[in-house]
Image (cartoon, grey):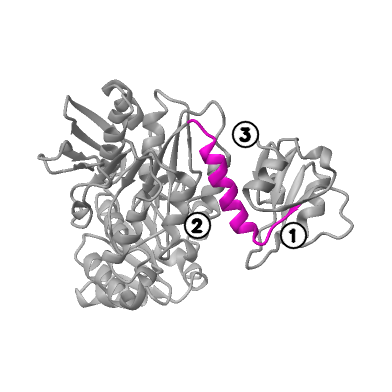
Amino acid sequence: MKNMTLKEIATACKGEYHGDEHFLDKAVSSVVIDSRLVQIDSLFVAIRGERVDGHSFIPKTIEDGALCALSEEKLEGADFPYILVSSCKEALIDLAEHYRQALNITAVGITGSVGKTSTKEMMASVFSQKYSVQWTPGNFNNEIGLPLTIFSIRQEHEVAVLEMGISYFGDMDILSRMARPDICVLTNIGTAHIEHLKSRDGILKEKSQIFNYMNPEGRIFLNGDDDKLITIPPYKGITPTYYGLNPELPFYATNIISKGLRGTTATYHTPKSTFTAHIQVPGTFMVYNALAATAVAYSLEMADKEIIKGIEALTPIAGRSNIIETEKYTLIDDCYNAGPATMKSAIELLEQAETRKVAILGDMFELGPEEEKLHYDVGLFAGDKNLDQIICIGSLSKHIYQGCKSRGFENILHFPSKNEFFGQIDKILSLNDTILLKASNGMAFSEIVAIIKER
């Protein structure tokens, strides 16, 4: 990582240095919170978790080569450098903010209710055709994950694609302060995290805080088909650029042709050109991700041929519309996360399969007081689709079951837990089934994916 000394670190995070002063001018090689990822000269930040307290691993990290540790506890008798701080989490944030401002890089910040990760992956694929790109791994998009992504940026990187996810009011201000985006992208305003943010207007207000620390000469890109995002006015003289399916927008798509599980082909229109590209990842919603990437790529002075190559190079990632072919089944692994909109999109994707279609649906979390109704609405939606079997797993998914049954759909089962489903799995699934697995991450449906793959 870019040169950052212990003296600089102590100042940036308002900490008190303890140890041999000869180490103060020595630079760390990386910043980690997982003791297993320690390298020679790493800075280990001792985060207190719900189950594990990082402070208990400090001595081991030093043995493994860490140069220094950030600690909330005074380490009596320590014979190694450490920096005492009031909060390791706050110190991590302060340090990330400091490090980001020392980087000479174009940062693209992405937020929205759904589609953040898939848009981030699409942009990384496109931008990599011209630039050296670093992007958020997995969903490292919160107050702990974003700093780690920022620390992974190296001198050779030219563009950083930073996913920014929030749950509570005030979260985005902190993320924006660290990311300092040059380009801001908002995918949509849905109902994810509505439990804490109260309404779509509340979500819009919080998501819009991404502008708080953006480059005053930066760019803003918004989904022009979203009824909330189109209400965002110019921010400090920066007029948003819109993308979507409306041909009156500067970046839009036509001739969208679904190839089912084999992806989507579309024609993309820019202010200067028109081109056609095929997205390998299934789901027509991916066209919006390609449009967002195209719009930002134009601001980065990329050519159409580079954009096309990037769109077509994108491959699925685990848990995100990932098609898995086994000897017996075709799995649509979309179980990383879920909300009402993405659940419905996944069901529509399954409907395009050419074999027996089975949906395994689980609970959706953080939906607030209307969580039962929102699950019931998904059931109503699923009950009208051309599916062969629906399995609902979890306490909230009972309402999906009820909504589906009210539509007269009979081939539906409900299991309170995964274990009860596992006991019946051989009786339910048939050879050559196409199986969708969709639920919030907390349901751990990846266990179901693993068991079905083994069979």
In the image, is residue 85 part of the stretch drawn in magenta? yes
Q: In which quarter of the image is the N terminus?
A: top right
Question: Can you tell which of label 2 and label 1 is closer to the viewer?
Answer: 1
Q: How far apart are marks 2 and 1 (CA)?
A: 30 Å
Residue 6 shows in this picture: yes
x, y percent for residue 219: 30, 38
Query: Residue 398 versus residue 358: which sits nearer the camera?
Result: 398
x, y percent for residue 345: 27, 55
Callout 2–callout 3 Cβ contact below 8 Å: no
Mainly helix, strand or loop, the magenta region? helix
Earlier sequence position, callout 2 versus callout 3: 3
Q: Is residue 256 left or right of residue 164?
A: left
Specify the amino acid type for callout 2: Ser
Earlier sequence position, callout 1 versus callout 3: 3
In the displayed orientation, state which residue is furthest to the left: 248
Q: Distance between the residues labelled 2 and 3?
A: 33 Å
Specify the amino acid type for callout 1: His
x, y percent for residue 186: 31, 49
Earlier sequence position, callout 2 versus callout 1: 1
Q: In this view, does 375 lie to the left or right of 45?
A: left
Q: Is residue 355 left or right of residue 140?
A: left
Q: How far apart are marks 1 and 3 (CA)?
A: 24 Å
Label 3 sits on a secondary structure element that is loop
Pointer 1 local density, CA inside 10 Å: few below 14, some 14–19, many at least 20: some
Location of residue 126 by image quarter? top left
Q: Mark 2 points at which residue?
A: 446
Residue range corresponding to the magenta coloring: 83-104
Q: Mark 3 points at which residue?
A: 1
Identify the disc placed on residue 55. 1
